Amino acid sequence: MNSDEGTVYMIRGRAAAEGGDEWVSPEPAADVITDAVVAATDRTADEIDAIEAYVDADELRAVLGDGDSETITFDVEGHDVTVTADGEVTVS
């Protein structure tokens, strides 16, 4: 999910939420990605720059909204972060 201008949005755990009856609200992709990095590393949110410092918003939008790409992988503080079109975020 995206906005043509500005913030890119995604649904956290979209694949898990599909088929359920619960309302799921989109969140800024930067928040979801930052939370995933914090959960997978010993970093705090304050130690991570704005996501735009690591990945171009248009490239992220191509995965999460436009459907032009299936995945994108980028480095955040020495960790590979992969975001898929399904809204899954993995950190290694």
Image: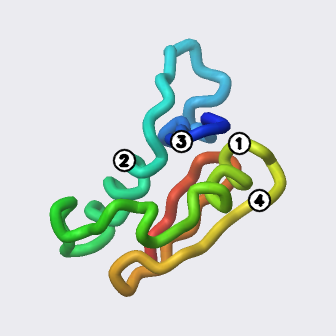
In the rendered structure, find residue 65 and report the number of the disc placed on it. 1
In the rendered structure, find residue 31 and report the number of the disc placed on it. 2
**Circle 2 or circle 3, nearest the eye:** 3
- Tell whether 29 sits left or right of 49: right
Q: Which residue is mark 3?
A: 6
Please state which amino acid type lies under the numbered disc 1.
Gly
Tag 3 and tag 1, C-beta contact below 8 Å: no
N-terminal of the two: label 3 or label 1? 3
- Image point (36%, 47%), residue name: 31
N-terminal of the two: label 4 or label 2? 2
- Tell whether 82 sits left or right of 39: right
Tell me the quarter of the picture where residue 10 sits: top right
Q: Which residue is mark 4?
A: 70
Tell me the quarter of the picture where residue 71 sits: bottom right
Determine crowd level at label 3: few under 14, some 14-19, many 20+ residues with C-alpha closer than 10 A. few
N-terminal of the two: label 1 or label 4? 1
Residue 44 is situated, as x and y percent measured from the top left of the image, at 17, 65
